[in-house]
Image (spheres, rainbow, N blue to C red):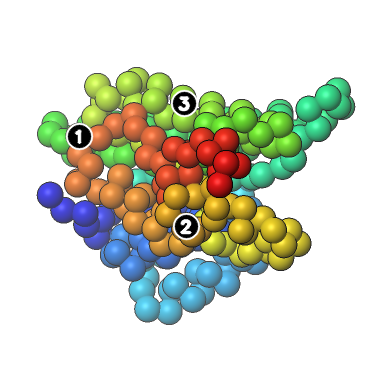
Amino acid sequence: MSFSIKGRTAIVTGAGNGLGLAVARHFVRAGANVVLADMDEAALEREVAELSADTDRVRMFTGDLRQKLSIANLVSATVDAFDRVDILVNAARQVMPTAPLDADDTSVEEMLQQNLSMPLRLSQAIARRYIKQAEAEGNEDGSIGCIVNLSSIAGQRANPELLGFSVANAALDQMTRSLAVALAPQRIRVNGVAVGSVLSASLLGWLRDHDTARAAIIEATPMGRLANAVEIADTVQYLASDASGFVTGQIVTVDGGRTLLDPAAIAVH
């Protein structure tokens, strides 16, 4: 079975930086048509200019995907550019601290809107597009499209300081499972990738301000290191390819074993 996504058309959200950008770059190298979507127009322009130097398989879309009109425009722009959509990667993630006892703290609502409602609405729109394409093509065999949601191991662990982010990611994982069951009869696969600590510009910046954090994360990770963004992108490509043709509703945890380790065991050493 092939891991190839060559010639397929993918939408990657949150593609202006971080994991979204890493996935988009990886997909372009793998031969896919890629639409990079983000709110940061300047970042997208820089990245698309670089990626487009060697290929015409790259487009950008700037818009607030929390708005239904922007979602519709993204789907239309993708179809106009490449005639179809085959892969959706919901990689737009936002992290915000929460003050659990502050009644005026709106971070939970904001995290749910950004990290749950937005990917849900976009997934629904893309699923409808997949079904329309399959009907027009008379496609009656195999998967007609896939969705991959990027979540976090924060959804599997309790962290009061990241209450909104943790709750949103736990809900996103459950949304992934529920959509997988709902869309399976239409031959649409839905999976997720729950990531641990990944070397990225934002994490590296945070680690510079927290001297002991890197050592603590590594100590809490059985594999003894942080992940590279390419390792996440490889997992996303697997879930987007025919190699995972009978995989749906799964949350693949890529964290070096961190969620397997009992924190109390670390304190003993």
Q: Residue at x 42, y 29 (%)?
A: 176
Q: Is 158 located above or below residue 35 in the figure? A: above
Residue 175 numbered mark, or none: 3
| Front one among 262 and 217 | 262
Q: Amino acid at mark 1?
A: Phe
- Where is residue 88? Give x, y as percent: 40, 44
Mark 1 — residue? 246
- Where is residue 76? Give x, y as percent: 45, 46
Mark 2 — residue? 224
Residues under numbered marks 2 and 1 in contact, where contact means CB atoms less than 8 Å apart? no
On the picture, is 160 further left or further right than 21?
right
Q: Residue at x 86, y 27 (%)?
A: 102
- Marks 2/3: CA–CA distance: 31 Å
Q: Amino acid at mark 3?
A: Met
Q: Amino acid at mark 2?
A: Gly
- Marks 2/1: CA–CA distance: 32 Å
One can see residue 162 in this view: yes
- Sequence-wise, the earlier of marks 3 and 1 is 3
- Where is residue 140? Give x, y as percent: 14, 31
> Tag 3: Cα neighbours inside 10 Å, few (<14), some, or many (≥20)?
many
Q: Is 36 located above or below residue 180 in the figure? A: below
Q: Is 80 located above or below residue 173 in the figure? A: below
One can see residue 121 in this view: no
> Tag 2: Cα neighbours inside 10 Å, few (<14), some, or many (≥20)?
some
How many marks on residues? 3
Q: Residue at x 29, y 39 (%)?
A: 145
| Front one among 241 and 42 | 241
| Front one among 136 and 60 | 60
- Sequence-wise, the earlier of marks 2 and 3 is 3
Q: Which element carries disc 2, helix, strand or loop?
A: loop
- Where is residue 175? Give x, y as percent: 46, 26
> Tag 1: Cα neighbours inside 10 Å, few (<14), some, or many (≥20)?
few
